[in-house]
Image (cartoon, rainbow, N blue to C red):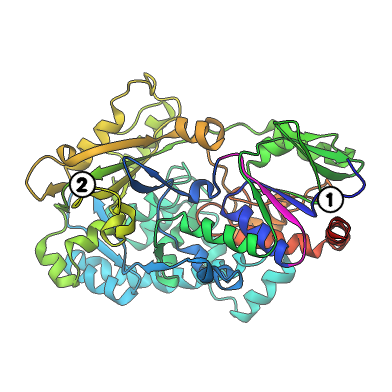
Amino acid sequence: MSSVPDYGAIIIGGGHNGLICATYLAKAGIKVVVLEARSAVGGNAATEVALGGARVNICNCDHTMVRATPIIEELGLAKHGLRYINADIVQTNIHWDGGPAWVQFHDAARTLDGLGHTYPGEMANYSAYLKDALPVARLVVDVANDSPTPGTVIPKVLRRRVAGVSTMLHWAKQSVGDVMRKYFDSDQLRAPLITTGPAVWGLSPETPGTGMGSIGYALRHAVQPGRPVGGSGSLPVAIEAALVEAGGEVRCHSRVAKIVCEGANVSGVVLESGDMISAPIVVVAADPQAALVEWLTGAPPQAAEIIARYKAQARHDGYEAKVDAVVDQPYTFNAVSDELTRVLGVSHDDVRNATSIVSPSLSDMATSFELKGRGVIADQPMFFSNSPSVKDPTLAADLPAGSNVFSIEVLWTPYDLHGGWEGTGEPERWLRTFGRLVTTQSGLPFRDTVRDWRLMGPREYEQQFSMVRGYAPSFAGTPVSALLGKDPELTRYSTPVGGLFLTGAATFPGAGVWGASGRNAATAILASDSRSAKARRAVVAATS
């Protein structure tokens, strides 16, 4: 490598966390480049054009946790076109075993009023749940906005006078199923939270240590969910613009083959093209196992333990699929009556636009989990569905009049499907199965109103997003384990190799459109005086 580095910092991966980290570093005066293997930034938070003009999101379009951080304001993302449509209905909950739907609003009082018309016996239970869960949710949000060290967490806990701490410690040891059974009498109230929590992590509701997933309902009351106009990808696009404005650079079609070390420190990367790019700081905003086991070259002795640990880790399989479609007719859920919409003060359009969660009983979830292990998808899967173009017509602007974008996410869809994915009828079956839940405007079967569709399954995630076996790495710990410093490279963002840092969904606070990991990693890098000083010197040398 040359004595004058090409950059002060290299970020591997142009997902939202990598872009956020890069932008904070650029704003601090470090010359930064983001290397993205695909043709555009955004990763799983991206939006792309498909199906003859529909704008579809790679993953779910709802943004909650990023709005609990100061990132949008600190990076001036509104100036770069980011605008949110606030979600009034944050979730409609439907159960395969029947019964009316119940609607969760951002406003807890409206949610309780609605329960009074659908599940009146659960109103007091929901109030008791919120009394315990809201302090935990607020504490988790607060803690996640800094690297979770005792020096940052303890003052926050003291400021809150320990509100929620004892509940958090208790729940962290339990399964989410046990916590939900403590509060609610029916699976109609228990199951949706599990579907949007541990089930998304690929875990059974009876898995010990998943109890912190119980804060899901409370988080959506504590933080206003919303959707970026133009799709989820409007967020990374705005961050990229802020990065470029701050002097940063993005290189797409730049797949990293090696992370190179000199002595005890990282010195740069080599691309698959053979090009070498030097920098005293390298940040991995991608799969840390691939980075530490496959890419790291010439690692110093102090990295031997972490490399061996990641080499010994088993590879997980992906277990989620998403079907995006163009539909020619509106539909209504059979579990959402006209009377219910009148009582709630909403329309069927509001319900179609919002994310609807379709869940089985907890016992059926346990069966589905066992089937997943055998490569089989349940007859009645867990669904997330929405039609986001109902309230954001920009998503369907290039489609024929009257058409809308429809998406359905299906949980526990194995990478190794029994019989194979090639030629499988599963995605078609999901659309037909969803059709049993709705009535279309004309009375036609729902599947007959679907003009075109595409599958984004575990195989597609692997092929298009470099997710080995379709699995998205996600931080599996709790705020408690993060505070204790277990796997410190995932919670403190630094590694034993000087100048090599980690960020992204595999690091605290985890998956989803949050961004706190990128911000926290930048803070950790800037606090590493010797390396950040060297990076700044690299900027001066390169521009003098």
31 drawn magenta = yes
Quadrant the C terminus occupies:
bottom right
Q: Residue at x 56, y 73 (%)?
A: 73
Q: Earlier in the sequence, mark 2 or mark 1?
A: 2
Side of 174 relative to 325 (left or right): right
> Can residue 59 be seen in the rendering of this structure?
yes
Q: Quadrant of residue 411?
A: top left
The extreme top residue here reads 419
Q: Where 498 falls versus 117 (above or below)?
A: above
Which residue matches tag 2? 97
Residue type, numbered disc 2: Asp
Q: Residue at x 45, y 25 (%)?
A: 416
112 drawn magenta = no
Q: Observer-nearest residue: 476 or 126?
A: 476
Side of 484 relative to 167 (left or right): right
The extreme left residue here reads 443
Q: Main secondary structure of the magenta part?
A: loop
Q: Observer-nearest residue: 116 or 101?
A: 101
The picture places residue 464, in percent across and down from the top left corner, at 51, 35
Which residue matches tag 1? 280
Q: Where 490 falls versus 38 (above or below)?
A: below
Count neighbours of disc 2 (C-alpha within 10 A) and say few if under 14, some if 14 to 19, many if 20 or more: few
Which label number is shown at residue 122?
A: none
Q: Residue at x 68, y 51 (%)?
A: 490
Quadrant the N terminus occupies:
top right
Q: Observer-nearest residue: 381 or 259?
A: 259
Residue type, numbered disc 1: Pro
Chain part drawn in magenta = 28-38
